[in-house]
Image: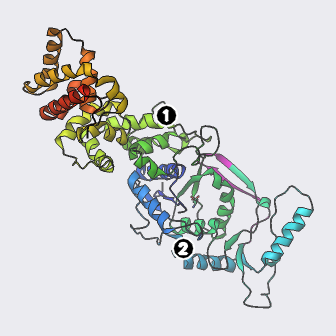
Amino acid sequence: MPEVRVRFAPSPTGYLHIGGVRTALYSWLWARQHEGTFILRIEDTDRERSTAESIQIVLESMRWLGLDWDEGPEVGGDHGPYVQSERLDIYAAYAEKLIQLGHAYRCYATKEEIAEAREAHQRTGTKEGFRFQSPWRDRTEPPADAATPYVIRFRAPQEGTTSWNDEVKGRIDILNSTLQDFILLRPDGMPLYNFGCVIDDLTMQVTLVARGDDHMINTAPQILLYRALDAPVPTFAHMPMVLAPNGEKLSKRHAAVGVLEYRDMGYLPDAVLNYLARLGWSHGDQEIFTRQELIEKFSWDRVGSTAGRYDAKKFLHVQAEHLRMLSDADVAGRTVPFLAKRGIDVRAEDPVLLKAIPYVKPRAATLVDVAEAVDYFFRDVEPEEKARRKFLVPGNADNLVRLADLIEKIEPFDKKLLEERVKSWLEDNDLAMKSVAQPARVAMTGRTQSPGLFEVMEVLGKEKTVQRLRAGARLAAYPEQTTA
Ligand code: GLU
């Protein structure tokens, strides 16, 4: 097999859509599996919609996902530049070559002429789509005014069939009679998508082109361009779109679609890749894959030819599984920025954070959940209003003071001993665990839900535990008082 060279070629017109990420991922997996080359190319020829900011979002998204590119912006490579708007001289040279070869021509038709032809076509009442037949296709003499602006059109064959064996869709045959003399270059020298894409894939020696199946209409024209240039045609793999649960094309209206939104929601890059990989590809019944497993197991023949539907619940489940696969220290490190967002400034090595992680990890799905679950270890608690009204009531004040008195004397301060002592104290005093546990929990955490009581105590440490129990007791005794 020749060296695998694959590329991801986003148009930087906004956020990086998770459907696009899936395309990038499959190509990246293919490259890594074959120790090939993964190229990132920016297709920014739509000058009105492309922005420098979007390019940065693409790069940031790819970096966050760990989809590293071997050639492309910021990395360089032997086939650059990797931004289309910087490659205009290359397109011009190839367009000229196609003209020389007789496969392209300068078309001086004006907008008005084309509009007229379209109207005439519509007047015939035919259902067939409009295809402009340029009078310049067969004309040899230039226009009277040499300065007349022109586009360069491909001289598309009008007979025969263009076929390819798609890695995902199988064999596809397109009648050339359905194609038109599509434009290669605009008057300002900007290539149209099909031309820019082919010249780039050809000069970058791409061996396999993976993209969404919305591009299938472009593939026959592209193959014709390769043939016209006597260049090898790459393999194509067209993936079905990612659909919303209701079957529509997945958009902002249905879910978070910009991949960085998942970063901000506390998802892990590997979980995002795992979920997206499975959305359209399968390997038996396996749902959870490490990045390495994806690299090893990915294959085009297991990519389904029908669209996968986005399922937020499943995605969150995959995320939770990946969170549990991380070491506590790793989770701590990744939680730090989310704590910073909450105004909590701790280091990844913070001993309280490290002690808390194993207790909160089993109940959390995202890093945002982890940050929210450890929040109260790092700031004074202000009990939630409802919890306070229910549990920090005068009848519980006394028990909280007694519990604090008891706990103050316990040494070493570990959860096992705490549990033992507290339980025997409850027994001796004929108290039910539940009459003390919830008020104590609210006093220590401000909430009605948390890890085990003694785990929380151990993480908080003796001083803070006692202090919070006493503060809780005061609040209970004087319900009108505020914590401030
Ligand atoms: N710029 C195109 C897109 O974002 C790339 C299509 C292709 O991969 O050929 O849809």
Q: Position of residue 435 (x, y in %)?
A: 26, 16
Q: Name the image quarter holding residue 265.
A: top left
Q: Inspect this view and state whether residue 152 appears.
A: yes
Instruction: Identify the element where label 1 is drawn.
Output: helix
Q: Name the image quarter holding residue 317.
A: top left
Q: For this view, does 32 lie left or right of residue 435?
A: right
Of the numbered discs in the image, which one, if any, rests on residue 156?
Answer: none
Residue at which label 1 appears = 313
**Toward the viewer: 239 or 33?**
239
Q: Residues within 10 Å of mark 1 (few under 14, many from 20)?
A: few
**Toward the viewer: 481 or 388?**
481
Q: Residues within 10 Å of mark 2 (few under 14, many from 20)?
A: some
What residue is shown at x 90% (from left), y 67% (from top)?
Answer: 120
What residue is shown at x 72% (from left), y 52% (from top)?
Answer: 173
Residue at which label 2 appears = 85
Q: Position of residue 54 (x, y in %)?
A: 49, 63
**Toward the viewer: 44 or 449?**
449
What residue is shown at x 66% (from left), y 54% (from top)?
Answer: 216
**Toward the viewer: 73 or 79?**
73
Indicate the amino acid at tag 1. Answer: Lys
- In this figure, what is the number of numbered marks? 2
What residue is shown at x 72% (from left), y 81% (from top)?
Answer: 150
Give the magenta range.
Answer: 154-171
Q: Is residue 51 above or below residue 404?
A: below
* Among numbered discs 1 and 2, the one appearing first in the sequence: 2
Q: Name the quadrant where ligand 1 sits.
A: bottom right
The yes-or-no answer for disc 2 within 8 Å of ligand 1 is no
Question: Dots 1 and 2: beta carbons under 8 Å?
Answer: no
Indicate the amino acid at tag 2. Answer: Ser
Q: Nearer the viewer, mark 1 or mark 2?
A: 1
Q: For this view, does 272 lie left or right of residue 352?
A: right
Q: Is residue 291 magenta?
A: no
